[in-house]
Every structure is written in structure tokens, then in C-alpha cells.
Image (cartoon, grey):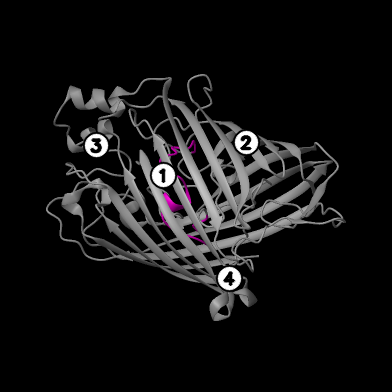
Amino acid sequence: MGPARAQVTPPGGATPVTPPNAASAQEPAHQPNDAPDQPRNWSLHFQQTLIDQWHNDLRTPYAGDYSLADRESAKLSFTSTLFIGRRLWKGAAVYFNPEVAGGSGLSSARGIAGFTNGETFRIGVADPVLYLARLYLRQTIALGPGTDADEDDLNQLAGPRPTRYLAFNVGKFSVADFFDQNSYSHDPRTQFLNWGLMSAGGWDYAANTRGYTVGGVVEYVTPAFALRVGSTLEPTYANGPTLDFHYRTAHAETVELTKSYRLGGRQGTLRLLGFRNVAAMGDYRAATAANPRLHADTSAVALFRAPGRTKTGFALNAEQELTKNVGLFARVSYNDGRYETWAFTEIDHSASLGLVSTGARWQRPDDRLGAAVVVNGLSPEHRAYLAAGGYGFIVGDGALNYGLESIGEVYYSLSLPRYHASISPDYQLVINPGYNRDRSGPVHVAAVRLHVEF
């Protein structure tokens, strides 16, 4: 599938995600207000993101069908999204997001597990396509008299919001709209581009090829902590465009606890996520044992699929304000890796660390400067399968001299508030793409991103 689409404004919680180009790296999106403005019944927003990306020429001893190409031209991707919200009755709203996407990632978004462009999909057609991204109902039930004031934002209606509430979300959405939020590293349209930085790499979250699913999320939110539980549909096959409505044998459950705290007077947030996926995943060990020298065939592991198999894992996500204008973030994630990667990307365990600063020190308070590293790895079963010549849906060189995939990324977001836009040059260094020391490169990836939002 494609990665999580860029975040919408998160639905409440102990520490909301900072909106793009906010004056402070940790200024809350929801500000307390003793007399909230009158609620608005409609919300209408638009975004468009274009990313042009290029990598250096490589000299590698061999390559497979899913390797990063040794030489290729620059690739352009774009998405355009309309965010429509309508208040229905007390505490209820419906959100509708038609989206157009087109273009391509480098090597058709293959060859690097922590892929370098979070706005690309693994689909065979680069032509622009219109599709339904989100259509869901949200019902909020107040559990106390206190309120804060929500601003008009992406998939968020302006008006009072309870400080303590239950919320029920049902319909089509991205699971990453509700889980694994991070103020500094979650949105490839305005923050880091790399897949392993925008989400927890080891979280094989349920979604179709374009990053969306159908299901429900229940939230219990207080000023001190938030608990979210979701159940959603899986695709019919790995990286598939169609969701499987045979819920008994194909579903995913996600639970996350969010806790805010203050350290040295500075805001911090911890998020602990656990997940369990059920789908007809292939068995890496069985596929490798049946034929120790697999042919370069993407169906090799598919021959060993069976309904009702489970994958479990966790993610720990932290963010800490260091100063008014500088923040630190980190993620650690893991899944058992016994069975086939089903939806996100071929990462079984991952760790990332990064810093983000506003441009306040050089009189550019709406700008952002970010630097981060992420290290990805595979389970023993997964690496043995690739070493035997097997392919997943994103990596596969026909052989494997295993090494951790290590990626560094630096970006600078230059804000153009007069035009509701930002321009971001981006650089990534990739060592051992696809976990293969024989193809270590290193790979230098340069990009320019243009983002417009109003």
C-alpha cells in the first residue's frame, strides 16, 4: 500500500499535533477558551503537494526486479485533497475527502523499505486518479462541563470541544489519522518525507494500496491522557487495492495510550501502541523451506498464504519540547515478522530519532528545519526468505547480504504565508537499501517539495 496519507488535524487528545507553519514548534492546535466562539456548521479546506525526487547513479554487483534502479530520471508525484466537514447534530459531524493523486516514486516506490517519498503509492499507473480518501462520521459525547475552542482546520469544525469526552468514528479513513501522531514527524506533506519517519516502521497498519481503510475508532480523551481503540479492515491480499469485508478472517485491532507530562517545565508526550492483524498472510519460513533457492517470483510467499494468520507488535512514540522553538522526537517499533508484510512496508523493527526547530532564531518563525535518522531491520524468517531469492512487494534483490537499512534525512521548510504555501528542499542518505550490504551505494536522494494549503 501507500504510506499513511498526510495527517489531518488529530481528533483531540492530550497533546494535539502542531498545525503546519504554527508560530511555535509545540503551540497547541486547540487553545483553552473560557468563552468559545459559536460553532460553525461547515469546514472547507484544500491541499496540494508536489514532490520532485532524484537519486545518484549507483554501481552495484547485481539487481532484482524490486531493486532501486542503478540509474533513473527524477520522479514527480502529486496529491490534491479537498477537506469538507459538515455538522449534523449536537456533537456529530461528517467528513468527506475526495483526493487526486498521480506521478511516481523512484523505482516505482520499490528498493528501499523506508522509502524516501511519503506521498507515493505502489501502483502501476502514474496517471492522475480521483478516488475517495475519507468519508466518516464522528460523534462526540461530553463527559463533563469543561470546554476548549477548536479552530477551523482540516477535518475539524470550529467551535467548542469538551475537555473530557468519548468519541466514536465510523467510516473510511486512514488509521494514522488517529494513531501514532507526533507533532514533529508524521506528515510527509510538511515534515519528513521518509516512510520510516512519518510512521512507526514496524507497525504494519491496515490499509489499501492508497493508505485508507474502513472501520471504527473509539476514543476516551481527558486533559491528562487519551485512550484509543480501533478495529479496521485489511486488504484482500498484500498491498492490495480492495478491502476484505470477510471480517471474521481479516481484520486489524489497534490500541494506543497517550500520556502528557512536563519535564523541566517543558511539554512532552508518550504514546504506547499495540496492534494485532489477522489476514491470509504468507509464511516466510514455509516458503523458504519448500524451495531454499526461490526464483525471482513475487508469488513465492503467496503460495503459503492461509486465512486467519496473526501478526502482533508494538510502537513507542515520544516527543519532548526542549525550548520554545526546538523539539525532540523518537520512535521504536516491532512486529514478530513470522508472516508476510501485508499493508505498510517491509520493516519488522525500527528505531528513529530526530530534532525539529522553527526559524525564529533567524527571524523566520514560520519556517522549519528538521534532521533525523532511522534504522530498520527484518526478522530472521523475513531475511532468510529474501536471501533465498524471494520477493516481497517493496524489496527483493534476488539475493541478500543482510545489513540494517540506515537512513538520515534533513529538510528545510521555507514558509510563504502570503501564498498559503511552503517550499522544502530535502536530502536523504540511504545505507544498505533493501537491507542489502552488496547494494549499499550509498544512495543520495535529493528532493524539492511544494505544498499549498488553505
Amino acid carrying label 3: it is Arg
Disc 3 to disc 2, how far (Cα)? 33 Å
Residue type pointed to by label 2: Arg
Q: Nearer the viewer, mark 4 or mark 3?
A: 3
- Between marks 4 and 2, how big is the CA–CA gap? 33 Å
Q: Amino acid at mark 1?
A: Gly
Q: Identify the residue under disc 2.
A: 228
Amino acid found under the numbered disc labelled 4: Ala
Q: Earlier in the sequence, mark 1 or mark 4?
A: 1
Horizontal and vertical percent position of residue 137: 71, 39
Q: Nearer the viewer, mark 1 or mark 4?
A: 1
Query: In what quadrant of the picture does the N terminus appear?
Result: top left
Who is closer to the viewer here, 127 or 52? 52
Cα separation, mark 4 vs mark 3, equals 42 Å
* Mark 4 or mark 3: whose residue is earlier in sequence: 3
Q: Nearer the viewer, residue 258 or 50?
A: 258
Question: Which of disc 2 and disc 4 is earlier in sequence?
Answer: 2
Q: Is residue 153 left or right of residue 264?
A: right
**Which residues make up the magenta segment?**
187-207
What residue is pinned by disc 4?
421
Q: How many marks?
A: 4
Q: Which quadrant of the rendered structure holds the C terminus?
A: bottom right
Q: CA distance from mark 2 to mark 1?
A: 20 Å
Read off the residue under disc 1.
201
* Residue occupied by mark 3: 383
Secondary element at image label 1: loop
Look at 63% across and 66% down and name the residue there: 22
